[in-house]
Amino acid sequence: MDTRLTALRKEKRVETAMQMQKEIEALSRMTVGQLRQKYLEVFGEESRSNHKQKATPANKSEEFVPTKQDCLA
């Protein structure tokens, strides 16, 4: 296998992970109203929760990795 291709794939995964981390950090700074609007944009329906803790990690040191169930909830 071409090592250049492997390196490019690894670099892309790192870039994607860094972008996801930035998006998660931005979500943690949003108000509940902003989070509800974002949920509506992403899922096309209103959120049934008014609790910010349900949408973002309680502790910034925690790593939040959404599961398929989180995305479908």
Image (cartoon, helix red, strand yellow):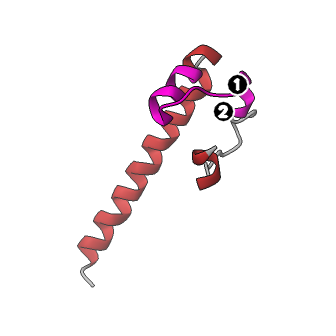
Mark 2 touches mark 1? (CB < 8 Å): yes
- Residue 33 lies left or right of residue 43; in this view the side is right
Identify which residue is drawn at 59% across, 47% down: 72
Identify which residue is drawn at 24% across, 72% down: 4
Give the image location of residue 70, x and y in percent: 63, 47
Gap in angstroms between the C-alphas marked 2 and 1: 5 Å
Of residues 58 and 4, the one drawn nearer to the viewer in this rendering: 58
- Of the residues shown, which amino acid type is indicated by label 1? Lys
Identify which residue is drawn at 47% across, 32% down: 44
Residue 1 is a magenta residue? no
Q: Secondary structure at mark 1?
A: helix
Identify which residue is drawn at 38% across, 49% down: 15
Q: Residues within 10 Å of mark 1 (few under 14, many from 20)?
A: some
Residue 46 is a magenta residue? yes
Q: In which quadrant is the N terminus drawn? A: bottom left
Give the image location of residue 51, x and y in percent: 74, 24
| Residue 25 placement: quadrant | top right
Residue at the extreme bottom? 1
Q: Residues within 10 Å of mark 2 (few under 14, many from 20)?
A: some
Residue at the extreme front? 45
Give the image location of residue 73, x and y in percent: 64, 43
Residue at image mark 2: 55
Give the image location of residue 18, x and y in percent: 45, 45
- Residue 17 lies left or right of residue 5; in this view the side is right
Looking at the rendering, the stretch of residues picked out in magenta corresponds to: 35-56
Q: How many marks?
A: 2
* Above or below, 68 relative to 41: below
| Residue 9 placement: quadrant | bottom left
Residue at image mark 1: 52
- Residue 31 lies left or right of residue 59; in this view the side is left
* Above or below, 6 relative to 29: below
- Of the residues shown, which amino acid type is indicated by label 2? Ala
